[in-house]
Image: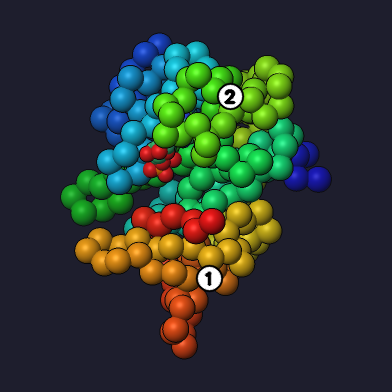
Amino acid sequence: SRLTQHTKTHHPFIVKEAIPSTNTFALNSFSSFEEGSVILAHHQTKGKGRLGRQWSATMGKSIALSLVLRPTIDSQSLPLFTQLTAAALCQALKAYGDTQIKWPNDIVLNGKKVAGILIESQFQENRLEGLVIGIGINTHLEPDDFEDSLLHKATSLKIETKQTVDPNVIIADFLIEFDQFYTDWLETRQTFPFISLCKKESALLGKEIHVYSPNEPPKTATVKDINEKGELIVHYQGHAQLTPLQSLDFSVRN
Ligand code: BT5
């Protein structure tokens, strides 16, 4: 089975108390972290989401980690890592309920966001030196911990399972799943194993979504596929062709 296979990756752990952001920490001292390093923080004071957004969590009630990787890849492969990570995280969180992937970077549990992924890259003299995969998982957040605006769209493992969970088990399970996809991909450069999982567990396939692009009114589209590059293939209303989307800002239409 997947779990009994050996992987080549090993994971030095760096554990911090409160820091602004594990991703920022990893990027600021990137050269000091070897491949596979995991930076864990008990608390983030300035957790980052994508596109300048914030990631927030009450102290001691969530997992915040960053995984440092130094693969030899070109920057075009970067979006693939969001899908690879989402597939691994979705698998690891399956033990807690019906997890799905909301392309490109959200894990939802019973329809609400329980985890998010933020991938940032490190360049040196125009060369991609590596990447930092940031993961936030809502383990023990309670409804009171969420801002009002998040209440109907965010949740935690504790809220959904009504049980406390073991963060160490979650982190270990995630790394096992991740290493399997990652080492396979490094060897074969085949994206099928994790892309097929992203499709199987997609919260968006077949759904109608609103696509928001800068300086344009939102457009309605139907989600048709996720391709081998990790792009979302959509069909815009009134268009003949299908359109591949990269991580544009968009929201699902109810
Ligand atoms: C994400 O961004 O979902 C990426 C989250 C990545 C967080 C990890 S924690 C470790 C590492 N270090 C960091 O500094 N970051 C990474 P995005 O798709 O842009 O979603 C952000 C949006 O999710 C916010 O604008 C809020 O609406 C919502 N949000 C904020 N905190 C949340 C939470 N704890 N649970 C669910 N939704 C949240």
Q: Can residue 235 be seen from the camera position used here? A: yes
Q: Where is residue 20 in the image (x, y as percent from the top left)?
A: 31, 22
Disc 1 to disc 2, C-alpha distance = 32 Å
Q: Which kind of residue does numbered mark 1 sit on?
A: Thr
Question: Circle 2 sits in a helix, a strand or a loop, which is it?
Answer: loop
Per the image, the residue denoted by label 2 is: 139
**Does residue 101 sit above or below 15 in this rendering?**
below
| Label 1: how many Cα within 10 Å (few below 14, some 14–19, many 20+) | many
Q: Which residue is drawn at 46% across and 78% down?
A: 237
In the image: residue 160, left or right of residue 133: right
x 72%, y 37%: residue: 97
Q: Which colour scheme is used?
A: rainbow
**Of callouts 1 and 2, the N-terminal one:** 2
Position above or below: 66 against 235: above
Q: Residues within 10 Å of mark 2 (few under 14, many from 20)?
A: many
Q: In which quarter of the image is residue 165?
A: top right
Picture quarter with ligand 1 = top left
Q: Where is residue 183 in the image (x, y as percent from the top left)?
A: 59, 49
Residue 189 vs residue 139, the one in the foreground: 139
In this figure, which residue is indicated by the disc labeled 1? 222
**Residue 90 visible (yes or no):** no
Q: Is residue 34 above or below residue 118?
A: above
